[in-house]
Image: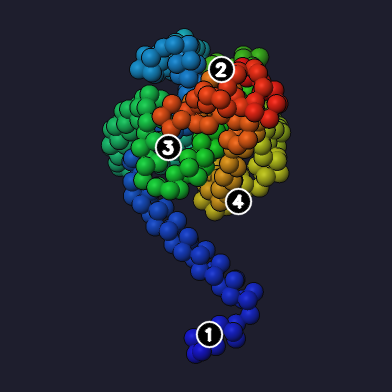
Amino acid sequence: MLPDRPTKLVPPVLAKMAAWCACLILVGVVVYFFALVIARLTFVALPVAIALLLTALLFPLTNSLRQAGMRPIYATWITMLVALAVLFGTGWLVGARASDEFPNLVQQVQATARSVQDWLITGPLHLKEAQITSYVDEIATMVNAQRTAITGTVLSAGAVAFEVLASIVLLLFVTFFLLKDGERIWAWILRGFGNVAPRVDRAGRAAWATLSHYVQGTVAVAAVHGLIMGIVLAGMGVPLWAPLAVLIFFASFIPIVGIFFAGTVATLVTLGAKGLVYALIFLGILIVEQQLENHVLQPLIVGRALNFHPLAIILVLAIGGILAGIAGAAVAVPVAAVIYRALPELRHQRPALPPPSHGPDEDKGRRGDAGGEPGEVPRPRGEGAAPLDDASGWRGAEPGGRDAEPGGKGENGRRVDTE
């Protein structure tokens, strides 16, 4: 009686709330330590995460080649080669355009610098040439003072470049094997879940479909953003418009900071090549287009792909940015979408199938089990039915019995129909 007494003193609602709080605390501790492990294994976790995104983007091509009758190894190689060809082809095109237009850009920047210097001297500021020279000297002095820090940054950048190269190699290997043996890898993972494997399988497949839709929608939004900005830069006659459009495309995958960096670079290039007026016009177009992307394109395209309401997309982006900054904003939408799709599959269990009913139509063809002809309904044992032989099933009528004459009459004078 003593153990039950404290339980009776606690209201049921409070007991349920305490149980839920304990579960939430346990889940929070597990998530915290999992995040610590991921942070320590960033060198491995980041390439694997990018490989999952690339696999979600490239798998439709691999699947189409497999359905066309191609072996998985060949379909995977063709997919990887096509992706590398597109990547290196884009890089070669951007590099060729940059090498052709860079001298013109230097000349335009020099002309813009001279015009700005003349405006500072003859404009409303009425600066003297000596003052401008002193400002330039101060900037040069600041650069020289930070030379040691810059040198250390370059050396650390070399180490980072080596790590990036190793990460790219790991990324390519992981992407290749996910495209080739994704189903086998998933089946191997499911073996560790035992009886709950069907639920995990359904949740994993729902999460994978959601992630694929998110990647495809994000690529579509980034392509629209890069295309519009490329057209604007080309229309203004800005040099290096193709490299800047590609830079804006890739920067669109990183919320906030990505477009801020790419937009700053494009605005500075426009300022140096075409002057202040064109730079302000481009900056205004960039701000308007970015707002349209954040509040119209991304919620509509990505929201439809994930079946999310536009308000949910905006709120998830805001919460992710507040909690974890840029990285949180980058992964907030896919993580929320994956959890939203996977949790129902983990919680609910499909009802068991009802036992098959044996109706008259389904009993047809079962006569073979009783020794009769296929497709015939077995006769019931009883009055008016021939007895069964233990060895061969149906046996003929007994001599002198009521079924002695097939198609004739029995002992009681009733006609017995036989086939």
How packed mark 3 is, by other alpha carbons closer than 10 Å (few <14, some 14-19, many 20 or more), is: some
Which amino acid, mark 4?
Ile
Q: Which residue is mark 2?
A: 241
Residue 4 image label: 1
Q: Quadrant of residue 268?
A: top right
Q: Nearer the viewer, residue 250 or 48?
A: 48
Compared across the picture, whether 1 is left or right of 141 comes to right
Left/right placement of residue 415 relative to residue 381 reads right
- Tag 3 residue: 49
Secondary structure of residue under mark 1: helix
Q: Amino acid at mark 2?
A: Trp
**Mark 2 or mark 1: which comes first in sequence?**
1
Question: Up-down: is 26 above or below 10?
Answer: above
Estimate the x, y position of residue 286 in percent, counting from the top left: 65, 29
Amino acid type assigned to the residue bearing label 3 in the image: Ala
Q: Between disc 3 and disc 4, whose residue precedes?
A: 3
Mark 1 or 3: in front is 1
Q: How many marks?
A: 4
Label 4, secondary structure: give it: helix
Q: Quadrant of the C terminus?
A: top right
Tag 1 and tag 3, C-beta contact below 8 Å? no
Q: Which mark is residue 319?
A: 4
